[in-house]
Image (cartoon, grey):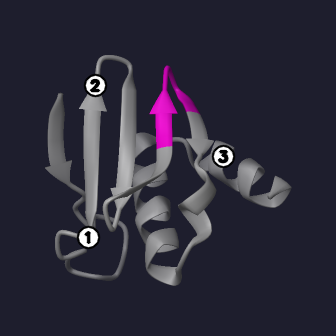
Amino acid sequence: MQMYELIARYDSRQSFYHKAVVHVEKNKTTLYSYETPVAVVSKGKLKLLPDWNYSNTTRRHVKEFVKQQNVESQYDELRRKK
């Protein structure tokens, strides 16, 4: 498994200050916000986990993650359903 800190490329913040971490396994990439799993991309499909909408900061982490994973359209659709 590979782990790395989520870097703010699209967000106006300079950094997420170690509060957002990405775990990469074989076909699964998971975003952790404040050590809690909040989103998974597996085989090109996005799944939002129950705590994805916990706080404004967590939503910022998720938005950045989905942009970097190129699954923005799935995020928009899932967000409307929740």
Q: Residue at x 39, y 26 (%)?
A: 28
Q: Point out the frontmost of discs 3 and 2.
A: 2
Sequence-earlier tag: 3 or 2: 2
Q: Which residues are magenta?
A: 40-45
The residue pinned by badge 1 equals: 19
Picture coordinates of residue 82 (x, y %)? Answer: 80, 58
In terms of image quadrants, where is residue 34?
Answer: bottom left
> Regarding mark 2 in the picture, which secondary structure is present there?
strand
Q: Is residue 6 magenta?
A: no
The residue beneath circle 3 is: 73
Q: Quadrant of residue 69?
A: top left
> Does dot 3 land on a helix, a strand or a loop?
helix
- What percent of the width, then of the height, locates residue 18? 17, 69
Disc 1 residue crowd, few under 14, some 14–19, many 20+, Cα 10 Å? some
Disc 3 packing (10 Å; few <14; some 14–19; many ≥20):
few
- Residue at 62%, 55% in the rendered image: 50
Disc 1 to disc 2, how far (Cα)? Answer: 20 Å
Percent across and percent down for residue 68 are 38, 49
Residue identifier under label 2: 25
Does 23 sit above or below residue 16? above
**Which residue sits furthest right?**
81
Would you say the magenta stretch is mainly helix, strand or loop? Answer: strand
For discs 1 and 3, the disc positioned in front in the rendered view = 1
| Rendered position, 44 above or below 63 | above
Q: Three-letter amino acid code at disc 2?
A: Glu
Image coordinates for residue 29, horizontal then vertical, percent: 37, 34
